[in-house]
Amino acid sequence: MADAKPRVKVPKTAAKGEVITLKTLISHQMESGQRKDKEGKTIPRQIINKFTCEYNGQPVFSCDLDPAVSANPYLEFTAKVEESGTFKFTWVDDDGSIYTAENELKVE
Amino acid sequence: MTLTRRDALGLAAGTVAFLTFGGKLAFAAAEETAAAISAFTGGKEPATGKITLDAPEIAENGNTVPVGVTVESPMTADDHVVSVMILAEGNPNPQVATFNFTLMSGTAEAKTRIRLAKTQNVVAIAKMSDGSTYIDKKEVKVTIGGCGG
Amino acid sequence: MLSLKSAALAGVILSGLSSFALAGGPVDEELVIDGETQITTRTKAAEGVPFEEVTSGWLYRTEETRALEADSFQNPGMLYVERGEEIWNTVDGEAGKSCASCHGDGQEFLKGVGAAYPKWNAKAGKPFNIELQINQCREDNMQAKPYKFDSADQKALTTYIKNQSLGMPMHVDLAQGDMQSWWDRGKETYYTRMGQLNLSCSNCHEENNGNYIRADHLSQGNVNGFPTYRLKQADMVSLHNRFRGCIRDTRAEFPAAFSDELMALEVYVTWRGTGLGIETPSVRQ
């Protein structure tokens, strides 16, 4: 795929103090650095190496990824929410690119 | 099906050779895995319990194997899970991923999808806020497809 | 029925994997995507199809693989559906048009379209699948270059188009044009043994579906999930890629994608799965 494109699934609303499940997926080859091309040359590693999730600027969850994470990396985790706000998701590529997504949540 | 008996025996012999060779590699990687665990735990031997690693018994393809971890914890300031490291003993490099939790995580549960080079143990180690560590392990059998697999 | 030779082979395979719990046949489960869209994965075979019931390849996969397809968020194939929707709405070519310029909103226009391909194309005098139809549109209407076989955009756009028929019954109209003679030709290919292994499509998918070839659980080879997200490639796999892969695995020379031989096979194999729900993007091993 041309560009890494993130997808996130966050509920629109939650109760105060509720633990909600968040799902994220991003299109990315996760080139492991272990493969060779047709000429027998090693294809250089290029992966998403870091993922973070913040809520209203506070860290919720993060993940350090190695080449053993599958292509189009999927992450599922939880967050405990006390007030309405914005989730910010960030993926960091080996080449320095940063991909982000934001989602609003209303706490009732 | 029209494979001859000779083809079939050749296939079986190949399988044995593969497993033997694979076994040696797994042994070397097990040492690397032990070193990675030791670095994560600060040299302590992790205890069993509290952490559950969820992985399929048989993976249809080693390229995309769903795994999940759950650690029992109240997730309070005094008692929470800091991080969980996932390792694959039989991969060229045992490191797979490390999940880092906060109090705002609410639980210490996470899932991802990983690559496994062959049948092997997947290992998950949790580090708690008091420095204690817990380990769980699952063997995942990786099948070798018949059709271009 | 297993022949003696294949029984002996199966024995070797099973002894090599003695700790595997291998159960035969399709599972008795229902595919409901996101708890909303029920997909027909078993249905009474159309008249002339040599099965009582036709079954989707989904029923031959492990619990984990089946679960991936049943959750449209977790299904990585949905990334390609999203990309395909972008392509649908993006202007390309000298005529300054996108797909949407002529056809409008994809979700409205495309409902049921993908479930009825291949279709007779009078201008070309042959059956067209989605990929060929896209390329004809690109050349004639958009004045854009046709997609190369299995280019990323061809796979994404085809996946998007087929996905708009999710859950609708796959059917092919053999009364159109000369479709019947292409069906005949496809049937001949289906039953022709080829390659150094001397295998026909029917040897695996008709006589041995439900059995194992090494560790692969053979399905009936129905095409209602294509393009399919294959875990092995971690990418979309087109039907003609799969046809070529299967023929390669018999150690035969394989025909070009969209060649008359493979288009005829597509017509015939699509007909065999008549009534199965479109699953695109299905998830397979």
Image (spheres, helix red, strand yellow):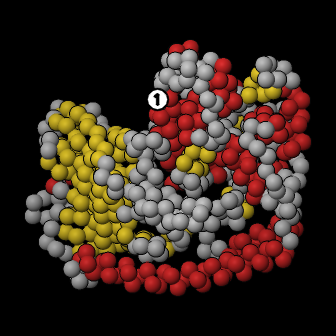
* Left or right relative to B105: residue C241: right
- Could you tell me residue C204's position as x and y percent? 79, 54
Q: Is residue B100 above or below residue C18?
A: above
Secondary structure of the residue carrying numbered label 1: helix
Which quarter of the picture shows residue C55? Answer: top right
Q: Is residue C231 above or below residue B12?
A: above
- Could you tell me residue A6's position as x and y percent? 36, 42
Q: Quadrant of the C terminus of chain B?
A: bottom right
Relative depth, front residue between B36 and C144: C144
Relative depth, front residue between C127 and C136: C136
* Left or right relative to C151: residue B95: left
Which quarter of the picture shows residue B143? Answer: bottom right
- The answer, for residue C39, to whether it is visible in the render is no
Q: Residues within 10 Å of mark 1 (few under 14, many from 20)?
A: some
**Tag 1 residue:** C86
* Left or right relative to B12: residue B42: left
Q: Residue at x 62, y 17 (%)?
A: C141
- Could you tell me residue A40's position as x and y percent? 58, 66
Q: Residue at x 23, y 33 (%)?
A: A104
Q: Is residue C272 above or below residue C105?
A: below
